[in-house]
Image: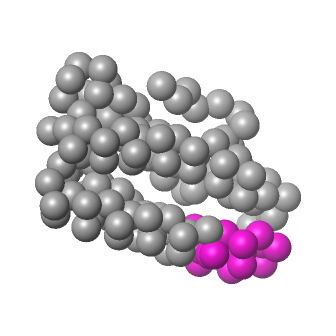
């Protein structure tokens, strides 16, 4: 389980609230996995991620651009790579939900939170809003 803490805070309420939603969804998936329901939860999780990433990435990128954050280009590049992974998960899901897919998705999203959010999104801390 991932617990929200100060290492995940960007200092920008909209971004942080979106990230909290992602962590909550991931924690729900982990509970489902532990309860033997992970395979049943994967279509819902992929649907959530599809909507979440497209909406959140767009808002976050627009915000970074608007406040002239130096991490903007890096962030956009990483978002594109994550969307490509998500598209691959959708294709795999169409072939059938599997425990392997659930574990892969869970592992990748945990790595995303620990890597992208902490190392890229948190560069927003140094960027002031106008």
Residue 39 drawn above or below residue 115? above
Q: Which quadrant of the structure image shows residue 50?
A: bottom left
- Residue at x 31%, y 42% (from the top left corner): 100
Residue 117 appears left or right of 106: right
Tally of numbered discs: 0
* Residue 23 appears in the rendering: yes
Residue 57 appears left or right of 119: left
Query: Is residue 65 in the magenta section?
Result: yes
- Residue at x 32%, y 60% (from the top left corner): 89
Given residues 23 and 98, the one toward you in this image is 98
Residue 30 coordinates in the image, percent (x, y): 36, 29
Residue 121 drawn above or below residue 103? below
- Residue at x 72%, y 58% (from the top left corner): 120
- Residue at x 81%, y 64% (from the top left corner): 127
Residue 118 coordinates in the image, percent (x, y): 70, 47
Principal secondary structure, stretch drawn in magenta: helix
Q: Which quadrant of the structure image shows residue 124?
A: bottom right
Q: Which quadrant of the structure image shows residue 73?
A: bottom right
Which residue reaches farthest top? 35
Residue 78 appears left or right of 128: left
Query: Is residue 104 in the magenta section?
Result: no
Q: How is the image coloured?
A: one colour
Q: Quadrant of the C terminus?
A: bottom right
Residue 97 drawn above or below residue 36? below
* Residue 17 appears in the rendering: no
Residue 99 coordinates in the image, percent (x, y): 25, 38
Q: Which residues are magenta?
A: 59-77
Residue 58 coordinates in the image, percent (x, y): 50, 74
């Amino acid at each position: 389980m991932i617990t929200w803490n100060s290492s995940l805070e960007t200092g920008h309420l909209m971004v942080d609230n979106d990230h909290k939603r992602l962590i909550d969804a991931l924690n729900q998936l982990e509970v489902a996995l532990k309860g033997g329901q992970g395979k049943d939860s994967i279509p819902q999780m992929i649907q959530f991620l599809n909507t979440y990433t497209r909406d959140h990435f767009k808002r976050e990128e627009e915000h970074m651009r608007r406040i002239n954050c130096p991490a903007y280009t890096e962030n956009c590049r990483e978002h594109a790579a994550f969307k490509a992974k998500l598209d691959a998960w959708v294709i795999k899901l169409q072939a059938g939900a599997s425990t392997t897919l659930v574990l892969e998705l869970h592992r990748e999203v945990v790595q995303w939170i620990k890597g992208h959010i902490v190392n890229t999104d948190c560069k927003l801390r140094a960027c002031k809003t106008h």
